[in-house]
Amino acid sequence: MIAAVTLISSCKKTDAPDPCAGVNYTIEYSKSESVGSSNNGSITVSFPVGDTIQYSLNNGSFQASRFFTNLAPGNYIITVKNQKGCTDTTQTTIFNYGPKYALVKQIILGYCGPCHLNGGMEGGKNYDTDANIVAAKDRIKARAVDGNPSFMPQGGQLTTIDKQKIVDWINAGGRISD
């Protein structure tokens, strides 16, 4: 998942004139969720080249690396700071996906866009959120596995292995934690 948040920078320095006045950043990041009982979530911050940027997670020490790995499920504050001390922050959450749901989510991300992703509402269904996927689990099975009333995704059926991943997830309870 890639997210972008445009924020107005603030500066912790009190020097005049304010070196951060007019500094605007767009903080973009991608993340992967933690799967199973492992702390294996990650956040990668994407940032424009040209500024010397340091990165911090949850108000920890700043570091040169824009990669944060081995993250447990939970809420995270991403802070970026340039060489003048100007900072911006944004927030994100790492979810704990069950291993079966993680496989189904990969299938949906790989086959359901643009019809049902990134705001797509084909057939009145959007799968941009985990809650929408869980709520539509019966429809996902009917269309992708059973072909009722016709097979999805458009342009061809899923492989037998991918169909089984959906069935296994639903048989386990069809939750994010399964």
Image: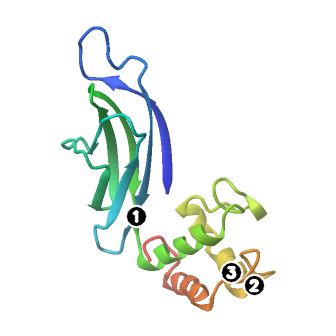
140 vs 105, left or right, is: right
Give amino acid for label 2.
Answer: Gly
Among numbered discs 2 and 1, the one appearing first in the sequence: 1
Question: Which of the numbered marks, if any, corresponds to residue 147?
Answer: 2
> Dot 1: what SS?
loop
Among numbered discs 1 and 3, the one appearing first in the sequence: 1
Q: Read off the residue under disc 1.
A: 33
Residue 41 picture location, percent across and down: 34, 63
Name the residue: 32% across, 17% down: 19
Name the residue: 36% across, 55% down: 43
Q: Residue furthest front?
A: 50
Q: CA distance from mark 2 to mark 3?
A: 6 Å
Q: Quadrant of residue 107?
A: bottom right
Task: Tell me the quarter of the image containing the C terminus.
Answer: bottom left
Give amino acid for label 1.
Answer: Glu
Q: Is residue 164 shown above or below 14? A: below
Q: Residue furthest left?
A: 61
Residue 60 picture location, percent across and down: 20, 44
Residue 89 picture location, percent across and down: 36, 36
Q: CA distance from mark 1 to mark 3?
A: 24 Å
Q: CA distance from mark 2 to mark 1?
A: 30 Å
- Nearer-the-camera pick, 22 or 92: 22
> Dot 2: what SS?
loop
Q: Is residue 49 shown above or below 101? A: above
75 vs 146, left or right, is: left
Label 1 Cα neighbours within 10 Å, binned few <14 / some 14-19 / many ≥20: many
Q: Residue furthest bottom?
A: 160
Total numbered circles = 3
- Nearer-the-camera pick, 108 or 82: 82
Question: Which of the numbered marks, if any, corresponds to residue 105?
Answer: none
Q: Read off the residue under disc 3.
A: 144
155 vs 96, left or right, is: right
